[in-house]
Image: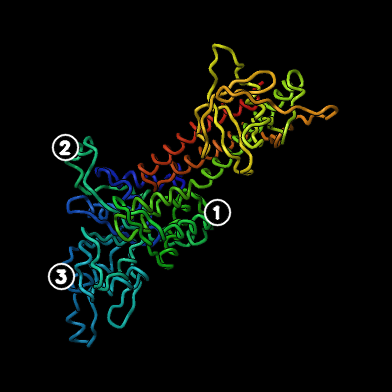
Amino acid sequence: MRMFSMKERIQALLQEINKGIYEKETELAMSLLAALSGESIILLGPPGVAKSMVASRLKSAFRGGRSFEYLMSRFSTPDEIFGPVSISKLKDQDKYERNIDGYLPTADVVFLDEIWKAGPAIQNTLLTVINEKRFRNGDKEIQIPLKLLVSASNELPTQGEGLEALWDRFIIRMECSNIKRESNFNAMLLDDESDNDINVPEALQITGEEYQTWSDSIGKVTVPEQVLKCINTIRRALGNVVVSNSDERHNVYVSDRRWKNIVRLLKTSAFMHDRTEVGLADILPIYHCLWQEPEEVEGIRDIVIGTLLSEFSSRFAQLKKDLESDIRVYRQHRATMKARKQIQENDGDKKIFDSFYYHLLDHDTGNTYIFLTDYQHMQSKTKENVGQMGVIYKDKKNPKRSIIRSYDGADTPQGARNVSLTRDPDGIYIDGVYFKIEKLEAGEKQQLPDTVGIVTNRDYFLEIEYLGDRIRKRVEEVNDNLFISQIDKKTMEEYANTRYQELAKMRYDVLKLEEE
């Protein structure tokens, strides 16, 4: 029989426990991740959305697994959860000890519905059970076999009732809803086997020895600097979380203990994918661990995904900026060389100022200049030609100087005045009034316009291909992750497709650097 890799085994196990249950793939996957991490999960949602079935399916993941399920009420007593007090031991040995067999302390997977209705005595005991996997029975403290505690409720804990500590113990928090896709809904209606227990092959079930061995190995998984940097970026961003359907922003508190447990989840995810180091893709599902109110989920999800993509977004923005700069400088070089040729052939007697301008004599205060390239391309004055549109405006860098430019309909400089422009070989007409261009004095040497800036010698095609490959690899890592939902995978693919389109346009723009 072929041996499974760790990932293949977990994948096959998830397929088995998903049989006959619809649109709960993410809840089951995250519950299994919680179980293998030694953490707990709470499912929020209305009755009848298969919250209890998630727990019963998880029991099947463990060989010989035992489960305990209970619906809480404000009348629930510790005896109903942890076992009744042994009358015989109390009577014969004067010992206050519970008969725990069949109750929470002997279960591998526990499901507690309506958790917030439990009284303080139950909740306080649960804190130790969840945190330390230990239970005090009389004068003895015993290690319990608990792998996973799944809790459920249709509401958040009421503030001010001392429930914050217990709420914080549930590292993974997920909202459960009814089946959304009509095809799945119809399949559920017609599936007579969906409520039955499933038979997971023993080869896939996790034994107690394996669970302990895996737990030790998970502790040895390393967390690279890149992942820590990403976590810190997310942590800072939680101070300004967008609230759905609102203009509000929340400062979401996440305790240090919670972050420590989240890192344990990341290590577990890496181990389940046959890795000895946490990868960035492992981070994506942790938005299920960071919210305090359901309205914060989407905002935190956007923060996590945005952080995972920030490397590509910043690199893309810089690459695009550099390319645009090189294209601009290259075109300036070409325009300058054409201008130099035009000057040498037709305008060699006109004096150039500051490499860009001709000076108009007798206009305004004598400080009016026109871009030499605009003059070169300006239409000549004829009876038929009434002129082309232009503007006159004050130079921001030298307010005493006025600049004339032909106007192509782009943004008008602040304070600009529209004019009509034509030219002849020695000057220009502004609204029909003629002004000559200053010429060189006898023996004065012309200062031809200089090229400005340097076009970098970069292989943009290679950089674009490299960035595209990095994005593609990240999407593949996300698609390969067993604990990332299909919705989150689709979001990553949509981002990638948008970037691929932008990179394709950028490839086209690179060709502009080769224009003659």
Mark 2–mark 1 distance (CA, rounded to whole Å) = 48 Å
The secondary element bearing badge 1 is classed as helix
Q: As drawn, which residue projects farthest toward the left? A: 75
Residue that badge 2 annotates: 190
Residue shown at the point (24%, 59%) measured from the top left: 152
Residue shown at the point (48%, 43%) measured from the top left: 477
Q: Are marks 2 and 1 in contact (CB under 8 Å)?
A: no
The secondary element bearing badge 3 is classed as loop
Instruction: Where is residue 361? Give x, y as percent.
Output: 68, 30
Q: Which label's residue is closer to the chain start, 2 or 1? A: 2
- Density class for disc 2 (Cα within 10 Å; few <14, some 14-19, many ≥20) is few
421 left or right, relative to 28: right
Residue shown at the point (25%, 72%) measured from the top left: 160
Which label was assigned to residue 74? 3
Give 133 or 406, whichever is nearer the viewer.
Answer: 406
- Density class for disc 1 (Cα within 10 Å; few <14, some 14-19, many ≥20) is few
**Eye-nearest disc, 2 or 3:** 3
22 left or right, relative to 271: left
- Residue 66 in sight: no
Residue that badge 1 annotates: 226
Going by the numbered disc 1, the residue's amino acid type is: Gln
User: What colour scheme was applied to this rendering of the protein?
Assistant: rainbow
Mark 3–mark 1 distance (CA, rounded to whole Å) = 47 Å
Residue shown at the point (51%, 50%) measured from the top left: 279
Q: Which label's residue is closer to the chain start, 2 or 3? A: 3
Q: Are marks 2 and 3 in contact (CB under 8 Å)?
A: no
Instruction: Where is residue 105? Give x, y as percent.
Output: 28, 69
Instruction: Where is residue 491? Give x, y as percent.
Output: 39, 41
